[in-house]
Amino acid sequence: MSEYNPYAAPNADAPADPSVPAQGEPQPWAIGEVISGGWHAYKAHWAPLTFGYLVVTLIGATPGQVAPMAALAGSIEEGTSAYYALHVPLSVVGWLVAEFFMAGFTRAAMRALRTNDASFGDFFAAGGRFPAYVGMSFLKSTATALASIVFGVAAVLVALKAVSPVVLLPALVFVVPGVIVALGLSNAPFYVIDQNLGPVASLRASWASTRGHKGHLFALMLVEVGMMMLGMAACCLGVFAVVPIMLLARAIVYMRLSGTAPAPSAPPGPYAPPPGYGGSASPGAAAPGGYGPWGPPGSYGGGPPGGHP
């Protein structure tokens, strides 16, 4: 059972960097709740999030399409050394460009949730965190691939026709470790952008924050897959709405698990009759229009604000 008390006084120390949110106790979350929160945040900022994602997706995909387009045009033969000499470096450039904009996309999502303000310029404003973001992304992808390396090797052997495709069936079980690692490191991008952590520190923080929540995160991932399929069914245009919504939902999960989500409103106090309702006023109570025994604002009670009587 969770020991989280949403009405407890905050016990987090203020961070040294004022731009980094203070951390408290992890907070519970539900799949429907975070998706609903993502949807409401998306409605408020749909224009920059949708068109920003569309534009940067096109920009990021361009470098990797140069060699295939040249092959279609007959300028270069596909599969040759010259083809790969062009395609491999440009694919790396495309990956770096995509990561740059993904860092900005993450920043836009966090600003939409924390300050209720997101703009198209946020997609280009994560340059200072770009090296850490790229390092985190590379290490995260490498860790996920190594965790499911058995399946990867089997897939390569099948592609080279060295073994029968039947081998992939038992090898599927080795996808599970990769999925677990991917879920455990899913919060790392937010730690880089929101808390200014480095690549390794962000991965460690993400793994710690998701401990005990991987089953819940897996269910959220399945919901994401379903929503992406619906987006693809809508002539692929729905993807440009689904992706921002799910990124916002993921950001909410991160804030809850890291203890940086805004504190909920305090509960109402004990029920009592309105002032002046029935009976006589208690000794020392304020008369209508008065300040009571504590005195007017600026005083500590019993006298005028300038000093003691």
Image (tube, rainbow, N blue to C red):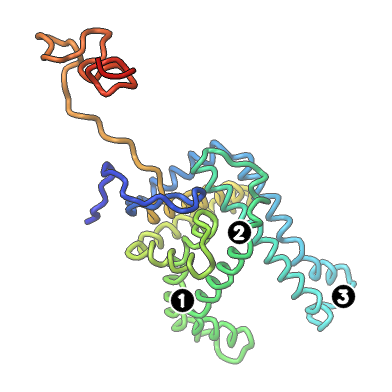
Corner quadrant of residue 90:
bottom right
Residue 209: which quarter of the image? bottom left
Q: Is residue 221 above or below residue 263?
A: below
Q: Amino acid under label 2?
A: Arg
Identify which residue is drawn at 31% across, 46% down: 10
Under tag 3, what secondary structure? Answer: loop
Q: What is the number of the mark on residue 95? A: none
Earlier residue among tags 2 and 1: 2
Q: Mark 1 points at which residue?
A: 175
The three-letter code of the residue at mark 3 reads: Ile
Rounded to the nearest whole Å, what is the CA distance between mark 1 and mark 3?
Answer: 37 Å
Q: In this view, does 238 lie to the left or right of 194?
A: right
Question: Which is in the foreground here, disc 2 or disc 1?
Answer: 2
Tell me the residue at 46%/53% (across/down).
Answer: 16
Where is residue 45, by image quadrant?
A: top right
The quarter of the image holding the N terminus is: bottom left
The answer to which of 258 and 48 lies nearer the viewer is 258
Q: Residue 76 carries which label?
A: 3
Query: Label 2, on which residue?
Result: 129
Upstream in the sequence, badge 3 or badge 2? 3
Helix, strand or loop at label 2? It is: helix
Q: Could you tell me if residue 299 is visible in this image?
A: yes
Q: Distance between the residues labelled 2 and 1?
A: 31 Å
